[in-house]
Image: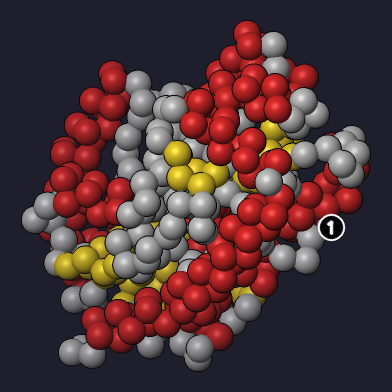
Amino acid sequence: MRIVVVNNFYPPRVGGSSHLADALARGYAARGHEVLVVTAAYADAPAREQRDGITIVRLPSFALPETRLAVSFDISFATRPSLWRRLAAELDAFRPDVIHQHGQFFDLSWATGLYARRRGIPVLLSVHTRLENPKAHYHGVFRLLDALMVKPNLRVDRPRVVIMDVLMDEYVKSRYRGAYSGLEYIPVGVDPAWTTGGDGSVARAALGLADDVPIILSLGHVIPLRDRVALVEAMPRVLESVPDARLVVVGRVYYDPFLRRAEELGVAGSVVATGAVPKSSVPDFLAAASVESHEQGIGLGTATLEAMAAGVPVVAPARKDNFPTIELGHREHLWFVPVGDSAALSDALVEALVDRELAARVGANAARVVQESFALERVLDQHLDVLAEMTAGR
């Protein structure tokens, strides 16, 4: 097959959808398929690049200002008068059999959707992000954007949609009902081998922490939906039982109320925010961690699965039915805690920090279930099965 992978977010830009799109593109190529990646220009990445058997085209783009309405995230768009002509020329030369889009609200998804309609090419859409914000007035704006911009485009394109977890299932059925041709339940994929083999001493040296200091690792960018406030509010109770524990937040801080809350609670000395780190450094932080926890909008995302793959015990404010096709057990594969319950969160963190035998068992079970159900090779198989079915009639 000739497969076009589309995502405004793509390496060197970091992030869950960026890394998954890249991993799938490289996986498609490794299986013998021709792959073209279409993305937005970012930083000093080359406009055209060939690596790992794929061709990457980065189209000129502009970045939205980092505002709370934009979920405090750096989002690049490629819309300009020359976009359609340039995009059509690239895709006509490649002659795609199928287009795999990542992100329902990006202009490159909309533009390639228009191209697919005109050329009769099937489209698979992976929805990574829910247009939501904890602030009520922003939430209303996002619902309006979904209703007036995203859904009308989907209704015309009629893509088949990849659902990665139960929250996205509920979101897509609520916001986009009638605007897609079908749903495919494929969990997010991670590379278990990549997460292991880190050197914890390297991360501890960078943090200035001794080998015996317990680390509560919190992976991922800090945005309103993953603001770390609940973790900070759990820290006073954690420190009563484990006085030398440190909360280490690894990721770019787009939204910083958790730091102010730490000052208010008198725990700022036990909270460390590293900012963004290279992806290659993440295994070192995983190797140093005693436990991992971060808010994911009451869901489990890529960072959680990467921690689980590395055998790090995870405490998650999430639902037990997070993955519709995969069953996860409380205190078996990870600790589930009610969303917004800082007491339950702190109790689970303390248990994971103090009962190291239980923590090791939970971490081992987590690594096993990730290998069996979330390994990238398995997820790649599922995507290729769907893509082959979609192109079979062409």
Query: Local crowd at mark 1 within 10 Å, few (<14), some, or many (≥20)?
Result: some
Using residue 143 as the reference point, say whether residue 41 is left or right of it: right
Judge whether residue 23 can be spotted in this image. no
User: Which quadrant is home to the C terminus?
Assistant: bottom left
Position of residue 155 measured from the top left corner of the image (x, y, whole percent) = 12, 55
Determine whether, in the image, residue 42 is placed left or right of residue 92. right
Residue 108 position by quadrant? bottom left
Q: Give 132 or 288, whichever is nearer the viewer.
A: 288
Q: Position of residue 357 (x, y in %)?
A: 69, 55
Left or right, 391 with respect to 35, comes to left
Look at mark 1 in the image and give the residue it sits on. Answer: 199
> What residue lies at 77% left-to-right and 19% top-to-bottom?
269
- Point out residue 161 in the picture as x, y percentages from the top left corner: 26, 63
Quadrant position of the N terminus in the picture = bottom left
Q: Residue at x 51, y 58 (%)?
A: 332
Query: Which quadrant would residue 87 be assigned to in this image?
Result: bottom left
Q: Relative to 68, is 205 above or below? A: below
Quadrant of residue 209 in the image? top right
Asked whether residue 229 is in view, the answer is yes
Colouring scheme applied when the structure was drawn: secondary structure
Is residue 117 placed above or below 251 in the rendered structure?
A: below
- What residue type is disc 1 on? Asp
The location of residue 122, given as percent across then percent down, is: 23, 75
Q: In the current view of this chain or complex, which residue is farthest to the left?
A: 178
Judging depth in this view, the residue of 316 and 195 nearest the camera is 316
Q: Residue at x 50, y 26 (%)?
A: 342
- Up-down relation of residue 219 to residue 21 (above or below): above
Please tell me which residue is depicted at 12% across the width and 52% down the height of the picture: 177
